[in-house]
Amino acid sequence: MSAQQSRFVRTLVDEFVRSGIEHAVIAPGSRSTPLVMALAERMTVHVFHDERSAAFFALGLGRGTGMPAVLVSTSGTAVANFHPAVVEADASNVPVVVCTADRPPELIDTGANQAIDQHRIYGGAVRWFFDPGVAGEFHEAERFWRSLACRALAESTGWPPGPVHLNLPFREPLLLDDQEAAVLGGRRGAVPWTTARRTTGVPDLSEVIEAVRSYDQGIVIVGQSPGVSAETLLRFATAAGCPVLADPLSGLRVEGTISTYDALLRSEEWAAHHYPYPVIRVGRPPTSKLLGEWTRHVDPQFVVTPELTWEDPHRSVNIHIVGSPEAILLEATDRLSEIPAVADRRSEWLTAWSTSDAKARAVVDGFCDDADVHFEGAVARDVAAVVPQEALLFVGSSMPVRDLETFAAPPVTGLIGANRGASGIDGTVGTALGMATGLGVPVVCLLGDIAFLHDSNSLIGLADRGLEATFVVVDNDGGGIFHFLPQVNHRDFERLFATPHGVDTAAVAEAFGLEVERPAPGGVGDAVAESMRRGGSRVLIVPTERADNAARHRAVMAAVSEAIWP
């Protein structure tokens, strides 16, 4: 067996043990050999010749202990024989972690022995299914494996508890390498990589409070769906002595929060001198990829969300607290107020952030105000500035949501929507109209030309729906985001990536019976405000040039870097 495959199973088992799982139930077979050997090294193992008996024994362990057992089978029909117990575990809300060994992908659908389709074989009877693929060499694999084990436990013991299914393909040879070949690592103190902590009452915040007390350079990140009021968020941040980096999608980019963090972090020197400990995130991850990369190795990290969504793309989170963010932050604020001068110690840290934010904001606004042509960053800033709290601001994926994050000045509050679950551009028009209808409010939708054309059928009948909808279409005849990516240097860039369409977006809007306007540079905000005053539905076309827009972005970031780190 490859050393990497040995590391995988030993790391997975190590994380199970750290998380409190003590029992493994084994139905014998060959393909499951590496996992069985690793489990036998660390857990109490129960062996049953019959898979059905093994599965129901594991079910009994779950009932008796409240913790899942690891239930293991080889590939093929052995997997199917677990199904009755999995169904019972689902119906009875009993935790079980089902680990089915599988043939590697090159042996599936080839007539190979004992190779069946095991993906989602238990259907809706499991709380979660995942297949990580054959263990291989890739960046930070251990973080991924440890997070995988922790999530399996969290999903199995969640609300309600039940079975989860991990399908684990293994390649021959199947015997483990020597123990020395397996590098385990993990969190200090043999604690789990990520702990999911659900609460309906007073949460256990001891680790959070201790981290804030021990470190003087913490930050609070607030993303979409935070579930907390601006007042509570700022009270907590003040008590903790932490700046708040507020994604506008949170609806909490208010005065006193940091709005230019994406621009600040583009200065490598500034970012290196302001590295945070700890990180406390409320809500979903921020839009900024740069912010996520910058904080990926911070330890400790805490996340507070209303539900367990396991949004941790970098596998960085130590503790995920699930409950009411409002109640959790209020409790944390009260706890921190009992510690003398926590915030006072951090005055220099807070001043560094606020001063840099003010300098960056001045540079950003200067570029936006001086543009003699439409600049997409200025468009996002100006649209966000004029949408009232009682209306909906809906933002398309790709560049518009990124420009909103980078350029929008506080306050950006109220009703804000975006399809950031899968982050596609499809359905932007329809989602904006549906959300506005559900809320019973006017909508301003900022989106790109391709997103507008992609979902133009949602405009059918708009004039008769009685909606007040203003669409701000940033029209650069293609995919502007690719000018920020390495593909820009490809010899066939325009045809393969930028994909200019040559479609008259104004004509498309008019074909659906919508009024079209073309604001002058610097006049987009006024045009949006006037459109909302007049009511009805219309489309504002804002033409930009892709290469020029990318150059302006780079110039802004260079100027910010010079202003904050001369």
Image: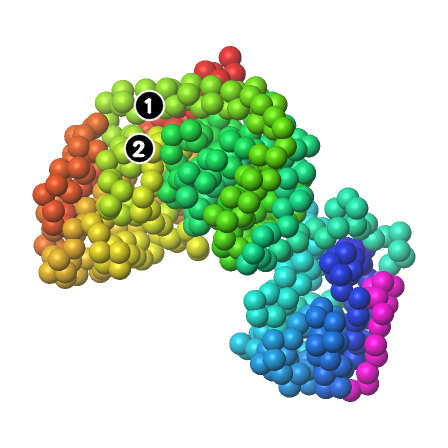
**Residue at the image position 56 percent from the left and 67 percent from the top:** 159
State which quadrant residue 21 falls in.
bottom right
**Residue at the image position 62 percent from the left and 55 percent from the top:** 197
Question: Whole-Å distance between the Cαs marked 1 and 2?
Answer: 9 Å
Q: Is residue 346 above or below residue 385?
A: above
Q: Which circle's residue, 1 or 2, is located before the other in the chain?
A: 1
Q: Quarter of the image containing the N terminus?
A: bottom right
Residue 381, percent from left and from top: 31, 33
Write down the region rendered in magenta. Answer: 38-50
Q: Is residue 47 left or right of residue 205?
A: right
Callout 1 touching callout 2 (CB < 8 Å): yes
Q: Nearer the viewer, residue 524 or 439?
A: 439
Q: Is residue 311 left or right of residue 56?
A: left
Q: Which mark is residue 365?
A: 1
Residue identifier under label 2: 381
Q: Is residue 26 above or below residue 142?
A: below
Disc 2 residue crowd, few under 14, some 14–19, many 20+, Cα 10 Å = many
Q: What is the total number of numbered labels drawn onto the structure image?
A: 2
Q: Is residue 52 above or below residue 213?
A: below
